[in-house]
Image: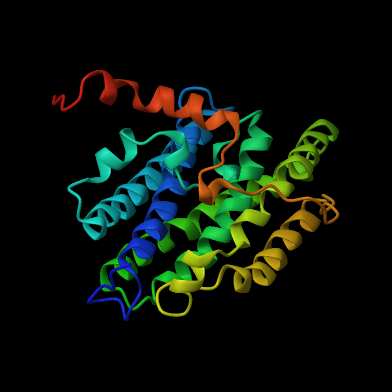
Amino acid sequence: MRPTDEDAGVPREALFEYLLRLGDDRLVLGHRLSEWCGHGPVLEEDIALSNVALDLIGQATHFLRLAGQVEGQGRDEDALAYFRDAIDYRNVNLVELPNGDYGRTIVRQFLFDAWSVLLLDGLQRATHTELAGIAAKAHKEARYHVRHSGEWVIRLGDGTEESHRRVQTAVDELWPYTGELFAADQVDRLLARVIAPEPAALEPVWREVVIDVLHRATLTPPAEGYMHSGGRQGRHTEHLGHLLAEMQILARSHPGAKW
């Protein structure tokens, strides 16, 4: 691996891989949320989720653009978004899961948002100036996102008997996908402390925030158990391929199209 000049010895390939992870998490989740556009339970929420989706896709654009610059192979954010196969995507499996009902979508969003705020807070102090700048802007958006999704978890969990049952089911089903947010591999170890927070260091704070909201929502945190993994290494659920087929069809059918 070639060291970069800028990043205190962090290998360029590791930084590229890490930026892909940041971009892919947000691109895939943003596309998932966009599926709610025109289908929200109330008009205000339809607009709110669409705005969150746009924020995430905007963040993905910046992270993937920087990834392309670090890679130095002539790929920009569009090439990285539309011309990679599922096995090349580095998002966690949590964000590619189907939306389900509105409660399930909100629970997934809250679990991700609570983690994203902590991660971006650490990244905005990174020694990599451009990455820190992107993270600082994204952190402001993520703080709004987690406030919005957290309030809805409380409202639905402490709502009707049916809304409570649905949200508790979503928490139980999605919890086994959260372990991947805090798992570390060689890439994370290379970037830790110089550019990015150590994933495991975020988990205690994340748990405190998430469990506090679950209790306020009269929901029961799941018992510890098996955790899914593999997304960071390109091992995804069957759902990502279907999502990418829809997201990429125009760009792949008409490469270079402009309008």
| Rendered view: 47 above or below 10 | above
Q: Residue at x 58, y 43 (%)?
A: 93
| Rendered view: 224 above or below 92 | below
Q: Position of residue 248 (x, y in %)?
A: 35, 27
| Rendered view: 142 above or below 257 | below
**Quarter holding residue 166:** top right
Quarter the C terminus occupies: top left
Q: Position of residue 86 (x, y in %)?
A: 46, 35
Quarter the N terminus occupies: bottom left
Q: Is residue 4 visible?
A: yes
| Left or right of residue 240, residue 124 in this image | left
Q: Position of residue 147 (x, y in %)?
A: 57, 56
| Left or right of residue 87, residue 155 in this image | right
Which residue of the protein is positioned furthest toward the top in this rendering?
Answer: 253
- The colour scheme is rainbow
Front in this rendered view, residue 132 or 69 = 69
| Rendered view: 148 above or below 36 | below
| Left or right of residue 103, residue 62 in this image | left
| Left or right of residue 254, residue 1 in this image | right
Q: Position of residue 161 (x, y in %)?
A: 85, 34
Q: Residue at x 28, y 23 (%)?
A: 252
Q: Residue at x 37, y 75 (%)?
A: 126
Front in this rendered view, residue 33 or 233 = 233
Q: Is residue 98 visible?
A: no
